[in-house]
Every structure is written in C-alpha cells, then in structure tokens.
C-alpha cells in the first residue's frame, strides 16, 4: 500500500471479528516491527504475542481496553539493553519500543489487520500475569484482529489541531 494512503486510512479499531490471526500474518507484523530503528541498534524491544483464547483471557485481567480483540501484542523494552544518553541518563529503550510498536501498527493495517494502541493497562498486573522479568517494562499494548463489519473510526479520529499549533521553527 502506498504510505500516504496507509496513514490516511489507518484508524484505531475497537470492534473485531473473533478469529485469531494466522501465524504467517503474526510473523509478518513482527518482522516489519523488527526492522524499526533503535538507539545504536541495541534492539531492546521485547514483544509478547497473545494469540490464544487463554492468553487473551489473562490479558483481560490487566486492562479493560481489550475490546474483545482475539490477538494482542505487548511491546516492552529491556532496560538493561538500552542506549543511555550521557548528559542526563535518559534511556532510549522506551522510545525504541514505541517506534517498533508504530511499525507494527502500520504493518497490521497494511496486512488487513485492525489494531488499536492501548496504554491504559496495569503494568504491574502485566508483569505478574505474564511473568515479565524485572528488567523488562511494558510500554504499549496493541490489540488486534480482523475488523468487524461494523468497525469504523471514532469521530475524534478526523479531528486534528492546526499544524501551526504543534510545529515551530527556530524557537518556541
């Protein structure tokens, strides 16, 4: 799909068909996320694929924003494998994980899969429920599946602030 068309048509899907994603589609989304740039190419992202009835049921204990999606991917970062900015100690790994998640979200749409970025989840419940190591922090949850026939963008999807309010040149 042409990139401009992809970003124009993609929206947050919150109404899904019940079918789990086939493994080849999951693999494609993961592969395209894996090509995302990361700080010094350290690749600190860790992705937990939840594509079974059992894992999706466990997910529902961690967030109310699951939208009954048949699949989800929890994008995390490994704090111990992060490039660190020397001036203030900032880690690149949370940003790296977000870039990976964005690639995956766009890949999902390009492959006919609906997706919704969710940050409304209990990170402590996620860590406990899915046995995440202490050094692995969840950043974004991508709930996904094939959009139902009733799926459509929410009204706010079509509203944007004027670009002049968010872009500045030379100084604020």
Image (cartoon, rainbow, N blue to C red):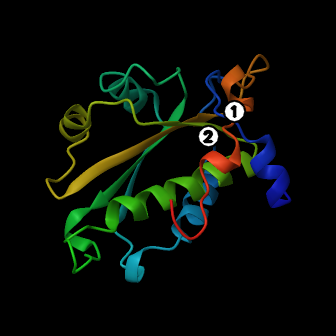
Query: Alpha carbon of mark 2 to alpha carbon of mark 1: how far?
Result: 8 Å
Q: Is residue 56 left or right of residue 102?
A: left
Task: Please name whichever residue, 68 or 19, is drawn nearer the observer in this view of the structure.
Answer: 68
Visible residue check, residue 53:
yes
The residue under label 1 is: 146
**Visible residue check, residue 50:** no
Q: Position of residue 55 (x, y in %)?
A: 38, 33
State whether residue 5 is above or below residue 115.
below
Callout in the foreground (2, 1): 1
Q: Position of residue 168 (x, y in %)?
A: 59, 60
Residue placed at 65% from the left, 29% from the top?
13
Q: Residues within 10 Å of mark 1 (few under 14, many from 20)?
A: many
Q: Residue furthest left?
A: 134
Q: Residues within 10 Å of mark 2 (few under 14, many from 20)?
A: some
**The image quarter in which residue 114 lies:** top right
Q: Are marks 2 and 1 in contact (CB under 8 Å)?
A: yes
- Left or right, 103 with reference to 110: left
Residue 47 drawn at (x, y percent):
40, 54
Q: Which residue is the site of mark 2?
A: 21
Q: Percent x, y for residue 22?
A: 63, 44
The answer to which of 127 and 120 lies nearer the viewer is 120
Instruction: Look at 22% across and 64% down and name the residue there.
Output: 79
- Quarter-of-image position of residue 64: top left
The one of 44 and 70 positioned closer to us in this rendering: 44
Of 125 and 28, nearer the camera is: 125
Q: Quadrant of residue 90?
A: bottom left
Which residue occupies 75% across, 51% down? 110
State which tag comes first along the sequence, 2 or 1.
Answer: 2
Is residue 40 depicted above or below 47 in this figure? below
Q: Under tag 1, what secondary structure?
A: loop
């Amino acid at each position: 799909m042409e990139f401009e068309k992809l970003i124009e048509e993609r929206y947050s899907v919150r109404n899904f068909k019940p079918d789990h994603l086939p493994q080849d589609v999951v693999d494609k989304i993961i592969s395209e996320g894996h090509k995302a740039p990361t700080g010094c190419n350290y690749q600190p992202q860790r992705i937990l694929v939840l594509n079974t009835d059992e894992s999706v049921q466990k997910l529902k204990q961690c967030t109310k924003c699951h939208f009954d999606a048949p699949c989800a991917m929890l994008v995390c970062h490994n704090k111990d494998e992060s490039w660190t900015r020397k001036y203030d100690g900032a880690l690149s790994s949370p940003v790296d994980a977000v870039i990976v998640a964005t690639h995956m979200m766009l890949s999902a749409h390009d492959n006919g899969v609906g997706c919704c970025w969710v940050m409304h989840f209990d990170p402590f419940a996620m860590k406990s429920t899915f046995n995440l190591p202490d050094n692995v922090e969840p950043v974004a949850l991508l709930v996904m599946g094939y959009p139902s026939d009733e799926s459509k963008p929410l009204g706010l999807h079509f509203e944007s602030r004027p670009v002049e309010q968010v872009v500045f040149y030379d100084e604020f």
